[in-house]
Image (cartoon, rainbow, N blue to C red):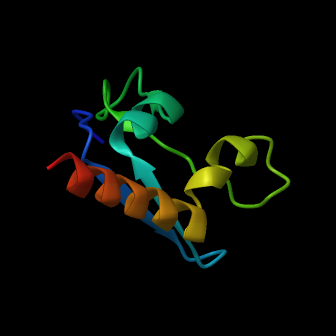
Amino acid sequence: MSITPRKNYFFIFYTEEDNSFWIIPSHEVVNLGSINKSGKNKGKISLKLPKNTNNPRFEKFQKYKDEDGFKLLEKFNCEEKESK
């Protein structure tokens, strides 16, 4: 992915294997992902979501999964409305 992180830019991913949604702010996609060093996607960001709760990386991603992720999006939307 080529990403220019912005405050109001969220990614919504769906993993069919565990029937889950992941709602992640663009700046966090950049922080959690890794930059490809070679190949046709050199310089682009790759993000690998954890497949199960036993994965050591799951703890970093847990706050973006399903209801928690949607709550994060709702919170952002409320903050935006209050600032106007």
Q: Which residue sits at x=32%, y=32%? A: 44
Residue 56 x, y percent position in the rendering: 80, 41
Q: Is residue 48 above or below residue 69?
A: above
Q: Is residue 68 above or below residue 43?
A: below
Judged left or right of residue 12, residue 20 is: right
Q: Nearer the viewer, residue 46 or 81?
A: 81
Q: In what quadrant of the picture does the N terminus appear?
A: top left
Q: Nearer the viewer, residue 33 or 7?
A: 7
Q: Which residue sits at x=37%, y=34%? A: 27
Q: Which residue sits at x=56%, y=77%? A: 16
Q: Is residue 21 above or below residue 26?
A: below
Judged left or right of residue 15, residue 26 is: left
Residue 77 x, y percent position in the rendering: 30, 59
Judged left or right of residue 39, residue 69 is: right
In this view, the residue farthest toward the top is 37
Judged left or right of residue 55, residue 65 is: left
Instruction: Give the mark count.
Output: 0
The quarter of the picture where residue 41 lies is top left
Residue 47 x, y percent position in the rendering: 49, 43
Q: Which residue sits at x=35%, y=29%? A: 39
Q: Is residue 84 above or below residue 52?
A: above
Residue 38 x, y percent position in the rendering: 38, 23
